[in-house]
Image: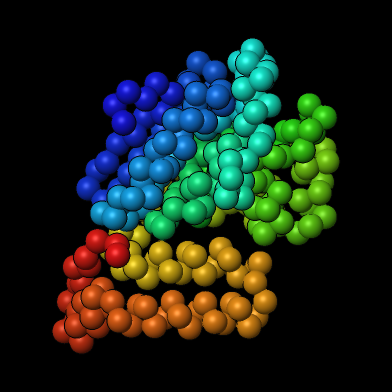
Amino acid sequence: MNDLRFVKFSLNGAIAEVKLNRPEKHNGVNLELIDELLAVAKQLKSQKAVRAVVISGLGPSFCSGLDFASVGKRPKTMIWRFFMPPLRRANTYQRFAWAWRELPMPVIAAIHGNCFGAGIQLALACDFRICHPEAKLSVMEAKWGLVPDMSGTVALHELCRLDQAKRLVFTGEIISADRASELGLLTEIADEPRSKALALAEQLSHFSPDAIKEAKALLNSVGSRSERSAFKHERWAQVRLLLSKNHAIAKKAAFKKQTPNFLDRR
């Protein structure tokens, strides 16, 4: 992944860092950045040793949204990416954010500066959002006479009250970190969001990666299942974990009051 231009990707032990790298554009999203981010997500999905991921932005902002000036120069490519390849349930723009929700390890967004449009949809698809107190957030598509179409409607519906989600989408208003936290969009507000995100990633890396994978999948899907289906998936997840080597490691460590040393994810 050394040939990436608009995304910086690094591994530090079991922690992966992904940094948006268009600082002069406040990390405005162009088509190349979308492709690079999806390539990184695809690589991470297969890396069983990675326990957590932190996404941040270089420069003054996390992400200021879609760079319409850049994307508009390639209208045919822009339109073509609205269509889904066979057997996929999301198009390229939706996968830009949703791919991080589908990763088997926890993903943490460290937000600062502007977090608008595509940026907030990317952050909302992460498992946790740690935000600088002076950051500004907006579902900004209303400014352009559009709707959030990078999976944002699903995440908003899950995280905040329906009337509040509608207000954010209908008006595109810019809100403070405090207001975003009140609405349930943020996990935490911190003066050093990246440092806090890395600390949380480190903490999560010491738990069974198999249990986190199963728990993430269960919690992400429960809203779309009937109770009967949710209970069935819960039971089978537990059976898989009870038969796993990492459960045996956790049990042995608990009885001996030791720190478990878990194996890589199955």
What residue do we see at 54% from left, 82% from top? 232
Q: Quadrant of residue 120?
A: top right
Q: Quadrant of residue 48?
A: bottom left
60 shown above or below 255: above
Q: Quadrant of residue 210?
A: bottom left
Q: Position of residue 140 (x, y in %)?
A: 72, 33
Return the residue nearer the eye: 184 or 90.
90
Instruction: Classify 80 as above or below 184.
Output: above
Residue 102 visible at all? yes
- Left or right of residue 164, residue 97 in this image: left
Front-lying residue, 120 or 92: 92
37 over 32 or under it: above or below = below
Q: Residue at x 65, y 28 (%)?
A: 80
Tell me if residue 162 comes above or below residue 77 in the rendering: below
Q: Quadrant where the N terminus lies?
A: top left
**Residue at the (67%, 76%) spot, across then down:** 226
**Can you name the residue that lies furthest to the front here?**
86
User: Would you say residue 202 is visible in this rendering?
Assistant: no
Q: Quadrant of the C terminus?
A: bottom left
Residue that protrudes farthest toward the bottom in the picture: 255
Where residue 38 sits: x, y (%)?
47, 37
Left-right relation of 148 to 213: right
In this picture the colour scheme is rainbow
Task: Report the front residue among 183 and 91.
Answer: 91
Residue 150 drawn at (x, y percent): 64, 40
Judge from the rendering whether residue 22 lies leftward or rightward of residue 257; answer left or right: right
Residue at (41%, 81%) from the top-left corner? 238
Q: Would residue 40 be found to the left or right of residue 220 on screen?
A: left
Which x, y percent locates residue 57?
46, 31
Q: Count every numbered label the image shows and give the total.
A: 0
